[in-house]
Amino acid sequence: MPKARLSMEDGEEIRISGPASGRVVEGRATILGAELGPGEDFRVGRLRSYTIRALKHSTIEVMLEDEARIEKPSPGEEPLEDWVEIADSLISSCELPCTVTVIGPVEAGKTSFTALLANRALARGISPAIVDSDVGQADIGPPAFVSMALVTQWVLWLRDLRPDASRFIGSIEPAPVAGRIISQVADLVGQALRMGAGLVAIDTDGWVQGWSSLEYKADLIRASRADRIVVLGDPLLYRVYDRIFPGRVVYARSPTRAVTRSAQDRRKLRRDNYERFLSEAKVRDIDLSRVSVVGSCLLATVPQNGDLLDSLRREVTDRIVMVGRYPGGYCVAVDSEEPVDQNTLRSLQKRLDREVLVVHTGGFRGVLVGLTGPDGNDYPGVVEALDLEGWKLRVRTAYGGEVRAIIFGRVRLGEEYGETPGRRIWI
């Protein structure tokens, strides 16, 4: 593993692309607003890139792994000094407790700026909290969750934090569940403030193209009662939000050489994060009669037996094992992976004059769920099997406490926590 020993003059900058680890041997240096002195360590994760700036003459040792590299940025290439000035000005001008929402396109530096904002609050003796609302590239909690963590020491990567509170959203795409994200983020902001946070920074996803995305972020800002909004890397986006929230929006430029993650990179980051929360999981059986159920038309509807069940078995398939009724429709469970003939299904809907949803009992396997505990927090689990006869759900989860609710999501995991592609999950 290559090792570098760097001597840096006051104000000199270097850029380290991970994976790498380092230590300040002498002097003082800043990374994302964290001020590190002699003996303090730092780590740069894979697919991350940080600029280190010497606050006085410093010696830094760096251990490089795999494809890690060290570069000297061109003058003005990195916005670290600008970011620190913006964060310090924002914190000093905002009445505490203060809530800040950070928005911008993909790879604009939102997560890095959020960490910097928390570090600058710590440097002033203010207790910060971070709310991670990016369900697709979640760092504090698992993917498909929004999470909050109180920050008590320097943070460079949000994945180094452990969640103090998490809420299951159930999707890695924000658009279909925007309302759920908004309500849960507002709840987490309130919880952070009740826990004593003087500054709450909200990190958001990179969905900023199209009017729906702009309205979603505006509703998120309103619901969380953000005092300030930081827009990164998109001057047009800044101008739009400055019209919506005049006097509350600040623009910050993005790094000119940001790390670009491919779709494959993002899937791997999610896989690693699923594993982080599920690798110690154990199998447990949950009695469905003792918990509330959200997100499953089969398990949340009213079971129907007798003539209707017999009629559907004759008309559709004898593999039907259960029929649930809800206002305006029926949920039909089939103990087979064979698709139901669409002409038969359309004929059935016309005859019943109701919506008919068909689910396959085997389709529950691998579905990501949130298990709600008595503390109101949600914990991740993966469905192993559904036992309709015993009315139990077998789940693999690291959570061992009391379960008060099961929330079914729109994500299915396969081998080694990889996401299984496919159309929307109907269960």
Image (tube, rainbow, N blue to C red):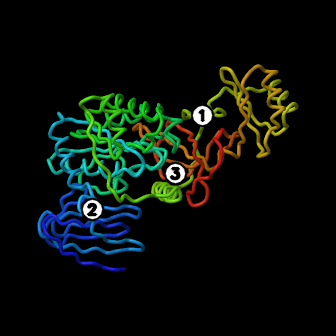
Is 187 situated left or right of 289 in this image? left
Identify residue type, mark 2.
Thr
Depth order, front residue of 331/402 = 331
Q: First in sequence: mark 3 or mark 2?
A: 2
Q: First in sequence: mark 2 or mark 1?
A: 2
Which element is circle 1 on?
A: helix
The image quadrant that residue 153 belongs to is: bottom left
Dots 1 and 3: beta carbons under 8 Å? Answer: no
Q: Which residue appears at 37% of the width and 55% of the height? A: 159
Label 2 neighbour load within 10 Å: few <14, some 14-19, many 20+: many
Q: Residue furthest bottom?
A: 2
Give the total number of marks visible in the rendering. Answer: 3
- Of circles 1 and 3, the one toward us is 3
Q: Badge 1 is on which residue?
A: 289
Identify residue type, mark 3.
Thr
Q: Badge 3 is on which residue?
A: 397
Between the residue at mark 3 and the residue at mark 2, the CA separation in whole angstroms equals: 38 Å
Q: Badge 2 is on which residue?
A: 51
Q: Which residue appears at 20% of the width and 54% of the height? A: 81
Identify residue type, mark 1.
Ser
Label 1 neighbour load within 10 Å: few <14, some 14-19, many 20+: few
Q: Position of residue 219 (x, y in %)?
A: 39, 29
